[in-house]
Image (tube, rainbow, N blue to C red):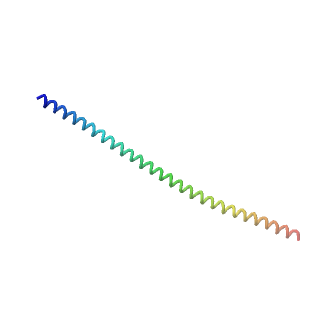
């Protein structure tokens, strides 16, 4: 009888330990899922930031090209102005 009660108590303890272990396993599974979700979110953020960086770099290159074009036009206008002024002075001198 004592042996049966001891086995019964041991079984109950084993079942309680198994339930506790299953609870911990479920909690760890939930934590793992949450961490994986965070990793996916961070990867998405990094991807968006990389896309923004690429767009910004492209816009900077376009702006540089437009600035060089505007500087060339300005330089041509200045040269044209000096030539026109020189021609005007020559015409007035005659």
**Hey, which residue is sitting farthest left in the picture?**
1
Q: Position of residue 52 (x, y in %)?
A: 52, 54
Q: Residue at x 69, y 63 (%)?
A: 72
Q: What residue is drawn where x is 65% and y is 59%? A: 67
Image quarter where the C terminus lies is: bottom right
Q: Residue furthest right?
A: 94
Does residue 47 appear to the left or right of 11 in the view shown?
A: right
Task: Provide residue 85's location: percent of width, then percent of height.
Answer: 81, 65
Q: Identify the residue at image location x=16%, y=33%.
A: 7
Q: Is residue 23 above or below residue 45?
A: above
User: Is residue 48 placed above or below 80 in the rendered structure?
Assistant: above
Q: Quadrant of the N terminus?
A: top left
Left or right placement of residue 88 versus residue 77 in this view? right
For residue 58, which quarter of the picture? bottom right
The outermost residue toward the bottom is 94
Q: Viewer-proximal residue, 82 or 31?
A: 31
> Percent position (x, y) of residue 17?
25, 35
The foreground one among 21 and 79 is: 21
């Amino acid at each position: 009888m004592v042996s049966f009660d001891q086995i019964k108590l041991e079984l109950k303890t084993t079942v309680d330990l198994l339930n506790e272990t299953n609870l911990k396993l479920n909690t760890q599974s939930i934590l793992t899922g949450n961490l994986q979700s965070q990793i996916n979110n961070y990867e998405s953020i990094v991807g968006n930031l990389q896309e923004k960086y690429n767009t910004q770099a492209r816009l900077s290159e376009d702006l540089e090209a437009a600035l060089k074009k505007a500087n060339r036009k300005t330089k041509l206008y200045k040269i044209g102005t000096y030539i026109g002024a020189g021609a005007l002075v020559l015409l007035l001198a005659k």
